[in-house]
Image (cartoon, grey):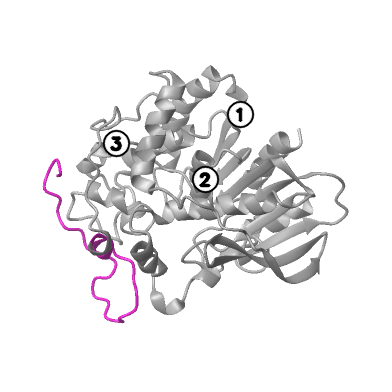
Amino acid sequence: MNRRTLLAVPSLAAGLTTGYPVWSWDRWREITAARRPDLTTRQTGSPFLTSLVDLPWPERRRVIFRTLQQFLGKPPGARPPLEARVIESVKAAGYTRKKLVYQTEPGEFVPAYLLVPDGLRGKTPAVICPHQTTQDGMREPAGLAGNPRLFMAHELARRGYVTFTYDALCFGERHQPATGHYGESIAFYRRCPEWSVMGKMAWDLSRAIDFLQTLDFVDQHKIASIGHSHGGYTTWFSMALEPRLACGVSSCGFDTFRYDGNAYRWSHATALVPRLGFYLSSRYISLKSFAGMPDSETVQIPFDLHEVLALAAPRPLFLAVSDDDQVFPNAGWSARRSLACLEPLYGKLGAADKIESYYFLGGHGFPPESARRCYGWLDRWLRG
């Protein structure tokens, strides 16, 4: 099955005796009986990011998409009625904030905030704002809790955009404190053993687009997504899977497997893409020390994240990247090497002006200059 015998990696559940669900890769394997994907691509075995223009783009795109599906899994075939209902409506400075729930899968209703600017005239662009890794969840982008610099839905509503934010699985109102880190993913994988939490998060964002397209004051062709950290990679994974997203912005949410050094953060430190856990070999990688630690098995992963970004092409895509990001310590190098692959592709597709990046020193944050550039990118492509 494996190219080499993979060594056991300590799980997050080690030493925990609470009896409550806690994420661990070993439990996922018990639940799903999953095996390492039997898949070889041009990226397999290479320590470098492969070219995106070595084949005609439609063919290259199909290969990338099929490979990604092997890891993210496939969503449900049917979309149930949204059955959205507003729970409360509050007047804020410059907009009205509506709390609602919408149905993403049969019987599953996700809590969300819709921010509607005052005095709308005609069809208005909308921006989805997935939250970062915080149990404040959607309350942070909505301006109700957390870091004021990350009040993205609030700030963009004040700039005249319709904005939407929701609690991701395992966060906010979709998290029970007793379950522990990503604990809700255990029940998810029992129900959907062939899917992934990352795929589910992109699905919930896609259902948010379904909801926004029911609103007569939203321009259906100008719906974008912006997020920081967890919200950043939710944005670009969703751009890869959801063609209705017109524009994407990621802040401190991008790295690559090969320059990050391993895939532990995606399979063990989180429950996002557990099939990547088959590509770990070092006994020394753990929750306390995984960021930037090289692992030789990483080169066998049959895709890398610059290819996921490429699935957004030729739509506008902006990366704000910190060169001293303590969460993604090699993010600056990853992004630069990825952009070196993406820019020829965008140029080949006649969209050279639709891919851009901004690098800064400021930790894992969203400083004012980064915010100015990110919001300006949205203005350029949603209002220009």
Residue 298's mark? none
Q: Amino acid at mark 3?
A: Pro
Give the structural element (helix, strand or loop) at label 2.
helix
Residue 354's mark? 1
Q: Residues within 10 Å of mark 3 (few under 14, many from 20)?
A: many
Which residue is found at the position 57% from the left and 65% from the top? 110
Which residue is found at the position 80% from the left and 44% from the top? 123
Q: Which residue is mark 3?
A: 302
Q: Is 46 covered by the magenta stretch?
A: no
Q: CA distance from mark 2 to mark 3?
A: 20 Å
Q: Is residue 117 above or below residue 121?
A: below
Q: Are marks 3 and 1 in contact (CB under 8 Å)?
A: no
Give the structural element (helix, strand or loop) at label 1.
helix
Relative horizontal placement of residue 6, taking residue 320 as reference (left or right): left
Q: Which residue is mark 2?
A: 238
Q: CA distance from mark 3 to mark 1?
A: 27 Å
Number of marks: 3
Residue 101 position, x and y percent, is 63, 66
Q: Amino acid at mark 2?
A: Ser
Res. 67 visible in picture: yes
Q: CA distance from mark 1 to mark 2?
A: 17 Å
Relative horizontal placement of residue 320, taking residue 54 as reference (left or right): right
Q: Nearer the viewer, residue 128 or 59?
A: 59
Is the C terminus in the top left, top right, bottom left or bottom right quadrant?
A: top right
